[in-house]
Image: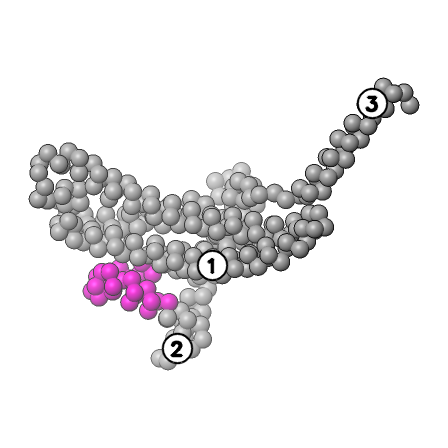
Amino acid sequence: MSDRTAGIAIPAARTRERTLSVTTLAGEFHAPSLQDFYPPAVLFEGTPFELDRLMLIRVLMSVVLLAVMLLAFRSPKLVPRGLQNVAEYGLVFVREQICDEVLGKESGRKYFPLIATIFFTVLFLNFSSIIPFLNISSNARIGMPLVLAVIAYLAFNYIGIKKYGFWKYMRSSIVVPNVPPAMHVLLIPIEFISTFVLRPFTLTVRLMANMLAGHIMLVLFFSATQFFLFEGAAWMKGLSPFSLAGGFAFTLFEMLVIFLQAYVFALLTAVYISLAQHADSH
């Protein structure tokens, strides 16, 4: 081998060595990608009814919700037991802690079906984020949170318009009484945006962002555990118990978030209905 050839081969060998060491260190770890939230269609591809993985999870959890409620109340007992007891506890919680607390007993009873439907829909769709092999909430994508927010938006505006009429409801919602006339130039646009734009926007984004963040964190914890155990350098195996413990702890925290997001969404829906009912005392 000539000196010139050797001069080329040695740096090339060192480059390959460095590449191999970097590959060994990096392994095959990949952060969550947009394909987690926009996967290819699984059923009915190319039609208006195509379903991807997230849509199938959404359908599955909706069926589970219906099945749980049907099984719980198919033959209700005076003294509830088992699944009926759990379901009744959830319904009583929504009625007493949300509907009656915010709307009062009369209005709370009237709008209880709507608020309970929203609460349990959000709750069950969120549960799939911690179920093995599902591992994601369909609320982590904007579609379902937006649909629920639109339902709440239409509901409280319909209630307000039905009670006051369109123009009086609009005037009562955006005109702040007992302020100098010149201030209305500033306050009316602020009140309009706050009431008719930000409410559905914040309902949608709050639910989606919390479930999306939780999914990403769980993916990072458990992907890191797999990487440390099977694909990283030997010294990284000692890190796997810490990432696994972190993933388990965050799963417990995610269970709390699942419930809180359902509670907050239902609670804000009740608050907005109450505000629409009392728009004239704005």
Q: Which label's residue is closer to the chain start, 1 or 2?
A: 2
Q: Nearer the viewer, mark 3 or mark 2?
A: 3
Residue 176, position as x, y percentages in the image: 13, 43
Q: Which residue is rendered at x = 52% and y = 50% of the image? A: 217
Residue 177, position as x, y percentages in the image: 10, 44
Residue at the disc numbered 3 = 7
Most common secondary structure along the magenta stretch: helix
Q: Is residue 197 visible?
A: yes
Q: Which mark is residue 58?
A: none
Name the kind of residue labelled 1 in the image: Phe
Is 28 in front, or is 108?
28
Residues at discs 1 and 3 in contact (Cβ within 8 Å): no
Q: Marks 3 and 2, how far apart in space?
A: 84 Å
Q: Assign a secondary structure to mark 2.
A: loop
Please tell me whether residue 111 belongs to the stretch shown in magenta: yes
Image mark count: 3
Q: Which mark is residue 80?
A: 2
Q: Marks 1 and 3, how far apart in space?
A: 58 Å
Q: Which label's residue is closer to the chain start, 3 or 2?
A: 3
- Residue stretch in magenta: 90-117
Q: Assign a secondary structure to mark 3.
A: helix
Residues at discs 1 and 2 in contact (Cβ within 8 Å): no
Name the kind of residue labelled 2 in the image: Pro
Residue furthest right as drawn? 1
Q: Marks 1 and 2, how far apart in space?
A: 30 Å
Classify the position of the N terminus by image quarter.
top right
Q: Which mark is residue 253?
A: 1
Q: Which residue is rendered at x = 51% and y = 48% of the image? A: 216
Q: Is residue 143 left or right of residue 172?
A: right
Name the kind of residue labelled 3 in the image: Gly
